[in-house]
Structures are given as C-alpha cells and as structure tokens.
Image (cartoon, grey):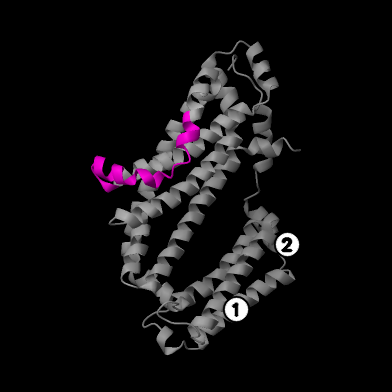
Amino acid sequence: MADSPKSFDWLLELGDARGKEDWTGKGIAHAVSGFRLGAEEAAVIGIFGMLLLLVASVPNAESQSVSGSNLFLFVAAVLPVVFVLRLLAAREDRQKTTDLFLMLGMLLLIWEVILGKLDLLDPFLFPSPERVFDVFRVDYRIMLVGMISSFSILLSGYLLGLVVAIPLALFIGWRKRAFDTAYPIAKAVSPIPPTVYLPYAIVLLPTFSSASVFVLFIGAFWPIFVGTVNGIFNIDQRILNSARTLGLKEHVMLSRIVLPAALPSVFSGATIALIMSFVTLTVAEMIAATSGLGWYIEYQHQYANYDKVIAGMILMAACVVIVMWFFDRIQKHALRWQNAGRL
C-alpha cells in the first residue's frame, strides 16, 4: 500500500527466509545420516531401557498391581522412540531435549522402583505408575468429555479477553487523557483475583459455563490490557515521529505501527493471561462444575481415589504443555522479525 510504512517489512521478509527449513526427502535423509548419539543421549536411552525391562519382567507388589493390560508398559516403550524422533526434529535443541527426557526418565524410574516394586509408601496415597496409567484405560471417556468441556471454556474466556483487551488498550494507551482516567482504575481492580467474581457470576448468569467464561475473561483481560498499554509506552519515539511525518491516519498508525511495535509486550501479557486462565478454570471447576478436568480431580478426591487424582493431574499437565507449545509457536511466528533484527 502506498500510504503504509515499510518499517517492519524487511525484518519480516528476513525472518521468513531464516525460518525456512529443508523438509524434502533429501534433507531428512541427510539429517538421519548425520545423526549420532552422545554420552548423555545414550544415558537417557539406557534409563528408559532399564525402566522398560523393569516393568516388563519384574512383577509389582501385590497392593500396587493392576489387572488387564499394562498401559504403563506401552508408555515406557514409546518414550525412548519419541526422544529419538525429537532429537532428529530439533537438532539445535539437543541439550534441552536430552535434559527434559533425562528428568522424565529418572522420575518414572524412581516412581516405579519405590512404589511399584518395593512398595515403600502407603499404596492408598501413593499408587504405582501402573495403577495411575490404568486410569486412562478405564476412565478415558469421562476424561475426554472433561477435556472438551475445559478447552471450550478456556478458549472462549481467553479469546474474549484478547478481543476486548487489545483494542481497548490501544485506545487508552494512545490517548493521554483516557490513560490518566483509566489507569488508576486498572491499578485498583486488576489485582483482585478473578475467582472473587465467581459467586455473583453463578447467580447472575444462566449456566455455569457462561459464569466460568466470564470469570476467565476477567482473569485474562487485565494482564493483556496492562501488557499492551506498557508496550505502547515503550515504543521508540523515533519510530512514531517518522510515521507522523508521512501523514498517516490514526487507524493506520495504530494498526500498522503501534500494534506491531507493542507486540512483544502484548505477548508477555498474553502469556501471563493464559497461565492465569488455566489456574482460574481449575479453581472454578473444582468449586461448582459437573464436568471438566478440575471437576474430575475434585470428584475423585472426595472418594479418595488417589490413583485417579494423580491421573487427572498428569492429563491436566499434558494439556497445559500442549496449549503452551502452540502458543509459543504462534508467538515465535508473530515476532520472527525480532530474531532477524539480531543478525
């Protein structure tokens, strides 16, 4: 566009060029042919091998055994394969991948030895990995329904917070008079935990889902709003002055200059908001829900099914990791010009 500034275009193009990878057959074959396991990677494979051998050949203590198929045996067999594939896919992050899988393998091995084989702790409170992972086989339907319920509420509340907070923060952060009026209110209201609004939300809104979406919206709104406003105030004035000399209209200035320049702070606030949304959702589901991962954990806790409580916690942690992974990919793509600018 003739009236649009090109301040960030060269950065975006450079980031695109830098981010391209060779995923052709030749590139993959070259990566595999050059793959070598170091001492630390071999140690990780060895730990998972010991775990697999232990689970497959040594029987559990009677109080920690399960009937039927052993899902944990399948997990112990799949994890080293995932580790090797991850090393092939992310050659530049080998140390990080190795450290993560090393900790995971040690944790599972210690868990299996102390609780599954030796039964050193109370089996009622501290179930073995076999008992915990068997829960996924038995309760997979109710867990799947809970995941769908939790994700629908999480995405609705979080996306609503994004849609409302970013335009409002642009408007207030760009106008000094609006900022002087709104900022003291934000300082007073934003520290209030969003779960405080839950009792009124349950009474005033027609369903628990709508009440939860509202509470998550409150929890996500303030970190995004504050992060965006701070990002606007931290923009280099030389960029704004250069854009003003072009005679840009205000909406073009906000959408093409201010928002892209404030994106790092926007994503910082959005990250905090996503974490807060997970915490708020779990608390809300534990208080008054009839479905969801938080409800599942609380419900099983009431009946002292601690193997199911731990299984619910593992599933929730896996969901958080997956969501945060997707969020990090989106953030890296949106801020790819930052890495290009460091060349």
Residue 205 seen in render: no
Disc 2 marks a residue whose amino acid type is Gly
Task: Sort mark 2 into few (<14), some (14-19) or many (20+) by Cα contacts within 10 Å.
Answer: few
Q: CA distance from mark 2 to mark 1?
A: 24 Å
* Residue identifier under label 2: 34
Q: Residue at x 41, y 89 (%)?
A: 62
Front-lying residue, 169 or 74: 169
Residue 305 is drawn in which quadrant?
bottom left
Q: Is residue 69 above or below residue 148?
A: below
Residue 288 is drawn in which quadrant?
bottom left
Q: As drawn, is 49 to the left or to the right of 128? A: right
Numbered circles on residues, count: 2
Percent coordinates x, y for residue 337 in the rendering: 66, 35
Q: Residue at x 52, y 70 (%)?
A: 78
Q: Secondary structure at mark 2?
A: loop
Q: As drawn, is 325 to the left or to the right of 282? A: right
Which numbered marker is on residue 40? none
Magenta residue check for 199: yes
Residue 290 is drawn in which quadrant?
bottom left
Q: Residue at x 48, y 32 (%)?
A: 186
Percent coordinates x, y for residue 170 in the rendering: 51, 25
Front-lying residue, 229 or 186: 186
Which residues make up the magenta segment? 185-208
Which numbered marker is on residue 49? 1
Quadrant, the C terminus = top right
Disc 1 marks a residue whose amino acid type is Gly
Task: Look at discs 2 and 1 and give the one toward the viewer.
Answer: 1
Percent coordinates x, y for residue 254 in the rendering: 55, 22
Magenta residue check for 57: no
Dominant secondary structure, magenta: helix
Q: As drawn, is 112 to the left or to the right of 234? A: left
Q: Secondary structure at mark 1?
A: helix
